Image (spheres, rainbow, N blue to C red):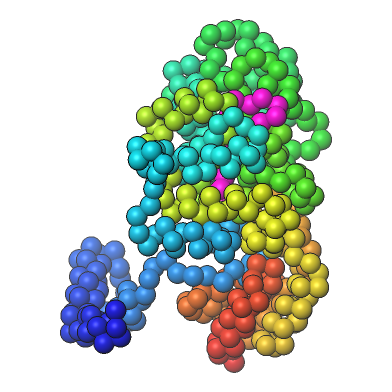
Amino acid sequence: MSNRDRLRDLPSVDRLATAVARAELEARREEILGGGDPTDGAAVDLVARARARLRPHLRRVLNATGVVVHTNLGRAPLAVEAQAAVAAIAAGYCNLELDLSSGERGSRHDHVEALLLELTGAQAAMAVNNCAAAVLLACAALAGGRDTVVSRGQLIEIGGGFRIPEVLQAAGTRLVEVGTTNRTRRADYASALAAGGERIGAILRAHPSNFRTVGFVEEVEIEELCDLGASVIDDVGSGVLGDDLDLLAGEPPVRRSVRAGAALTTFSGDKLLGGPQAGLLVGTREAVGACRRHPLARAVRIDKLSLAALEATLALYRDPAAARRALPALAMLHAGDATLSRRANELADATGGTVVASTARVGGGALPLLELPGPAVAIDPGPAGADALAAHLRAGDPAVVGRIHDGRLLLDPRTLTDDDARDVARAVCAVPRT
Ligand SMILES: *Cc1c(COP(=O)(O)O)cnc(C)c1O
């Protein structure tokens, strides 16, 4: 389209202004009539509100928190390869459910299954909307109408109200608790299986991602659980695919669960895997087949854009060293001291801030105790205070989100690229601080 055509296609000022003004006045009228808003009319800046209405609601944020997999900020940023795959697929039609060689109907799972088998050693695999959906589907497909055995130490809440007992109920399986909060042994599982007999559909192991128990604790390793004879669903959560990442050694690797013989292993696409929001299920042909056939599979299916990003992300894992460089979440976790110091110094020079010692975190409910030491830039907020500075930065475009500590705003270079850091510096300098 020529620029002239594009200019002609711009909405007229009248039409745009009228539409926005009408929506804003209607909203204000409802606030007043609803009686819920006592604000004096003069204090309500309807023009500012109308301006805000014209900006996209979902906006880019520069993450200066140092929390790498920040759930509130959209978790893992995508690798360049994954961004390109999304753009290419978004622009037109694709073979989402068409087998291009036969011309027959295909399965959307085919686009990532072979890669997942290669990377995990499983017999079969599928992808759904997120890991919560993967757990729900796994429990419904393997144990719906029957019982699921879970250790009392693993009746966990993941966040956002995802609680294992409630998930099992929603999946239509009855929870059989075994062991205690701190100690569950093989014999606890074995006696539940003996008592339950044919009623037992599965054993569910849920990784307590976001907390740790220490002291007088005991749990059953995945290999031993799989030896008990029942189908095991292993919800490992964060999805560590490489086994050469020392930093992530505290998280259960997917490969180990597959090797142990778990019927299904479930994990997230956008935590430590570093890809799009998705839930992965890998396991035996029979168990994955049961998931694919279950009516819930359609309700939790993954969309084509996530699938495009997921395929590109998984492909990077064929070369683990390349994955560590190309996947932003992994690169940030492994960022070297020299890079972090240089970026922190540049940010401090540009903003008049001070470099201080700080700690970044993994986030996303993974490795809750792991601290990643590194520099941060502390910004003195002036008399208005750190909250006002933070609010100013959040209102910008792109918004900047940092961390407030001891009355100062901390900006962590680990979760910023060099370009991001320059944009953050510009945003900080533009805020009046006197
Ligand atoms: C994060 C997590 C989930 C939920 O994954 P989402 O991708 O956020 O839906 C489920 N189980 C475990 C153990 C987790 O850590």
Q: Is residue 112 visible?
A: yes
Horizontal placement of 45 versus 207: left or right?
Answer: left
Nearer to us in this view, 290 or 217: 290
Query: Exactly how many numbered labels are in the figure?
Result: 0
Res. 385 image quadrant: bottom right
Please state the extent of the stretch shown in magenta in the rendering: 258-270
Residue 318: x and y in percent read 66, 49
Nearer to us in this view, 405 or 339: 339
Residue 96: x and y in percent read 39, 46
Task: Tell me what residue is drawn at x 51 percent, y 79 percent.
Answer: 392
Res. 334 image quadrant: bottom right
Quarter occupied by the N terminus: bottom left
Residue 326: x and y in percent read 65, 61
Q: Residue furthest bottom?
A: 434
Horizontal placement of 423 versus 52: left or right?
Answer: right
Quarter occupied by the C terminus: bottom right
